[in-house]
Image: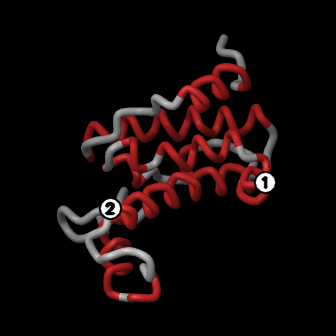
Amino acid sequence: MSLRADVLDTGARLIDKGRNAVRTVATLHPDHQLDDEAILDSLCQFDALGCLVVIGERGTSDSGNFYPSFAGYYSRRTEPAIARLVSDPAMWRELFNGDDRLLADALVVILDQAGKESFRLGAWGGVDDQSIVRFIAEHRTPQS
């Protein structure tokens, strides 16, 4: 919401702010150097999974409940977490409170919103991982 309300500094992105915070606290990156791209990847993945957690808890994929900050970065940074979620039942149980249909519908909404935001923010190009594409195709609510 802070990004939508333009509360953040001009040109700053929420994930960039998080990345800078991680860089200043050594215990937040004990296994990575300050400039390691894995830190940015982790923040993008955390953001995407956070969107899904909110949808699962609220039981609705209303886009007013989340903001895909990861949309300002290349899809390859976020896609591995989504692919793991749809294929790892233990991860799913821990993070998402919903059935196949709710998860597929949530992914459709989040990925669509990321695509719209990327027009303004930059690099997001959608998902290519076939496990994600198949999961959505098999489980989403049929379109009228």
Element under disc 2: helix
Question: Along the horizontal axis of the image, is 117 left or right of 83?
Answer: left
* Residue 54 locus on image (x, y percent): 65, 56
The N terminus sits in image quarter = bottom left
What residue is pinned by disc 1?
A: 90
Q: Give whichever of discs 2 and 1 has the lower sequence position.
A: 2
Farthest left residue in view: 10
Residue that appears at 27% across and 42% down: 123
**Which amino acid type is marked by label 1?**
Ala
Question: Along the horizontal axis of the image, is 92 left or right of 7?
Answer: right
* Residue in front for this viewpoint, 127 or 37: 37
- Label 2, residues with CA under 10 Å away: few <14, some 14-19, many ≥20: few
Question: Along the horizontal axis of the image, is 50 left or right of 75?
Answer: right
Residue that appears at 44% across and 63% down: 43
What residue is pinned by disc 2?
A: 37
Q: Quadrant of residue 124?
A: top left
Residue that appears at 51% across and 31% down: 129
* Residue in front for this viewpoint, 142 or 89: 89
**Which amino acid type is marked by label 2?**
Glu
Q: Is residue 43 above or below residue 142?
A: below
* Residue 5 locus on image (x, y percent): 35, 61
Residue 58 in sight here: no
- Label 1, residues with CA under 10 Å away: few <14, some 14-19, many ≥20: few
Farthest front residue in view: 31
* Residue in front for this viewpoint, 125 or 80: 80
* Residue 31 locus on image (x, y percent): 44, 77
